[in-house]
């Protein structure tokens, strides 16, 4: 799928959500599907090859994408595509466990993110599902993100930001949590001349619209089930169809 949209900040370039490209990643791209191209002020006519949007364009790309999504039907192709490509929220269970993994110099312990368990048993030493609790595991948001991510490098800055923001928000909402740096500083964003709140707001502008797609789908499904129940009762006098939990 290819969906082009205008940059709100720079009339010389255009953006796109393009899931068909396979561009070799260089620098710190937002995502493999987030691309930019030169228009030289000629609407959305592409006058250059495409390149992966870099972290310096984080705010403008997200806000420009949100503006484009708002102009289209909620159940349109772009929204459906973003449902699958926008980074998912990290589960609370995973966040809770990652925060509980903390280094203790007095004893060697092992953890399994898959099983979400801690153990001091030496039998875990050679079990590949388990890893020794590292010295940097301190319950901070950065530590949590590092444990959850493991050796997986992610597919771009948006995915990394989602993970670090979820870890930071969880820590902020949990009493007794250690002080943590905001994700923008942990990820060492460069070339960004605006505040961290503007970055978070830009990210959430798209995230909230993706959530709206799920909310719309939920309501639409519930209404369809209700209408089927009414039709069944009206036409054959049957008992209402039970909605599955």
Image: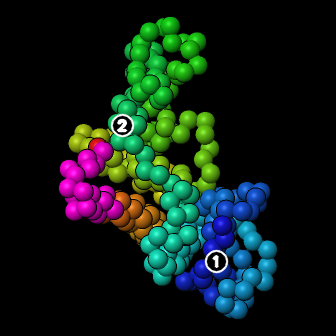
Secondary structure at badge 1 equals strand
Q: How is the image coloured?
A: rainbow
Residue 104 location (% of width, % of height):
39, 21
Residue most extreme to the bottom: 42
The residue stretch that appears in magenta: 224-244
Instruction: Judge the density around disc 2: few (<14), some (14-19), many (≥20) Cα neighbours within 10 Å.
Output: few
Which numbered disc covers residue 18? none
Does the segment drawn in magenta span residue 225?
Answer: yes
Magenta-drawn stretch, dominant element (helix, strand or loop): helix
Q: Quadrant of the N terminus?
A: bottom right
Report how far apart the C-alphas of labels 1 and 2 lie in the structure. 37 Å
Secondary structure at badge 2 equals helix
| Identity of the residue drawn at 38% across and 39% down | 95
Residue most extreme to the front: 236
Give the answer, above or below, for where 88 lies relative to 77.
Answer: above
Which numbered disc covers residue 4? 1
Which numbered disc covers residue 93? 2
Nearer to us in this view, 241 or 183: 241
Q: Quadrant of the C terminus?
A: top left
Residue 40 location (% of width, % of height):
72, 89
Give the answer, above or below, for where 147 lies relative to 161.
Answer: above
Q: Using the rendered view, name the quadrant where residue 22 is placed.
A: bottom right
Residue 129 location (% of width, % of height):
54, 21
Residue 194 visible in the displayed image: no
Nearer to us in this view, 98 or 72: 72
Residue 238 visible in the displayed image: yes
Nearer to us in this view, 89 or 25: 89
| Identity of the residue drawn at 56% across and 57% down | 85
| Identity of the residue drawn at 30% across and 45% down | 244
Left or right, 126 with reference to 169: right
């Amino acid at each position: 799928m290819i969906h082009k949209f205008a940059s709100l900040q720079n009339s010389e370039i255009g953006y796109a959500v393009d899931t068909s490209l396979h561009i070799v990643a260089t620098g710190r791209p937002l995502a493999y599907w987030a691309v930019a191209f030169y228009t030289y002020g000629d609407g959305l006519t592409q006058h250059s090859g495409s390149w992966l949007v870099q972290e310096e364009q984080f705010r403008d790309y997200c806000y420009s994408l949100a503006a484009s999504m708002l102009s289209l039907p909620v159940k349109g192709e772009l929204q459906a595509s973003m449902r699958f490509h926008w980074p998912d929220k990290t589960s609370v269970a995973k966040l809770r466990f990652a925060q509980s993994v903390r280094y203790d110099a007095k004893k060697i312990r092992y953890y399994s993110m898959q099983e979400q368990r801690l153990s001091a048993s030496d039998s875990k030493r050679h079990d590949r599902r388990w890893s020794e609790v590292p010295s940097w595991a301190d319950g901070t948001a950065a530590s949590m993100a590092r444990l959850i991510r493991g050796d997986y490098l992610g597919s771009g800055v948006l995915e990394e930001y989602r993970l670090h923001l979820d870890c930071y928000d969880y820590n902020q909402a949990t009493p007794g949590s250690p002080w943590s740096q905001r994700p923008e500083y942990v990820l060492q964003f460069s070339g960004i001349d605006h505040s961290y709140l503007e970055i978070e707001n830009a990210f959430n502008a798209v995230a909230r619209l993706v959530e709206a797609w799920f909310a719309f789908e939920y309501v639409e499904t519930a209404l369809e089930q209700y209408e089927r129940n009414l039709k069944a009762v009206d036409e054959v006098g049957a008992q209402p169809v039970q909605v599955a939990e």
